[in-house]
């Protein structure tokens, strides 16, 4: 049986926040001006977003960029 790998906590937070707001990954990509593959990589924890991407994601999710930065900072080693 296929086991889903756990996501990076930051990516998981972005994914849940997006879904709670009823925003598809495609729509988030359009709102941020990023490619859907980039959003997917962030949500899967395979890519750490640049500050400009965090700001755009926060705006698209109607959040303060500092909220996302605080969450990301907890998981950067």
Image: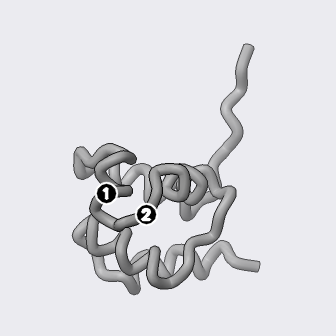
The crowd level at tag 1 (other Cα within 10 Å; few <14, some 14-19, many 20+) is few
Q: Which numbered circle lies on residue 74?
A: none
Would residue 3 be found to the left or right of residue 30 on screen?
right
Residue at the image point whose x is 27% and y is 48% from the top: 23
Q: What element carries label 2?
A: loop
The C terminus sits in image quarter: bottom right
Of 13 and 36, nearer the camera is: 36
Chosen colour scheme:
one colour
Q: Where is 3 relative to 74, above or below?
A: above
| Spot occupied by residue 42 in the image (x, y as percentages of width and height) | 56, 59
The crowd level at tag 2 (other Cα within 10 Å; few <14, some 14-19, many 20+) is some
Residue at the image point whose x is 68% and y is 57% from the top: 46
Residue 60 quadrant = bottom left
Q: Name the residue under label 1.
A: 30
Q: Which residue lies furthest to the top in this view?
A: 1
Q: Where is 67 relative to 26, above or below?
A: below
Q: Name the residue under label 2.
A: 34
Check if mark 2's residue and mark 1's residue have beta carbons within 8 Å.
no
| Spot occupied by residue 72 in the image (x, y as percentages of width and height) | 56, 75
Q: How far apart are marks 2 and 1 (CA)?
A: 7 Å
Would residue 57 be found to the left or right of residue 61 on screen?
right
Residue at the image point whose x is 36% and y is 66% from the top: 33
Q: What element carries label 1?
A: helix
Q: Where is 25 relative to 61, above or below?
A: above
Residue 48 quadrant = bottom right
The N terminus sits in image quarter: top right
Residue at the image point whose x is 43% and y is 63% from the top: 34
| Spot occupied by residue 51 in the image (x, y as percentages of width and height) | 50, 84
């Amino acid at each position: 049986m296929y086991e889903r790998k756990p996501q990076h906590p930051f990516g998981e937070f972005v994914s849940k926040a997006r879904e709670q707001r009823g925003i598809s990954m495609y729509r988030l990509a359009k709102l941020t001006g990023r490619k859907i593959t980039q959003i997917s990589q962030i949500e899967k924890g395979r890519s750490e977003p640049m500050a400009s991407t965090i700001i755009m994601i926060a705006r698209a999710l109607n959040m303060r960029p500092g909220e996302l930065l605080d969450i990301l900072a907890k998981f950067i080693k």
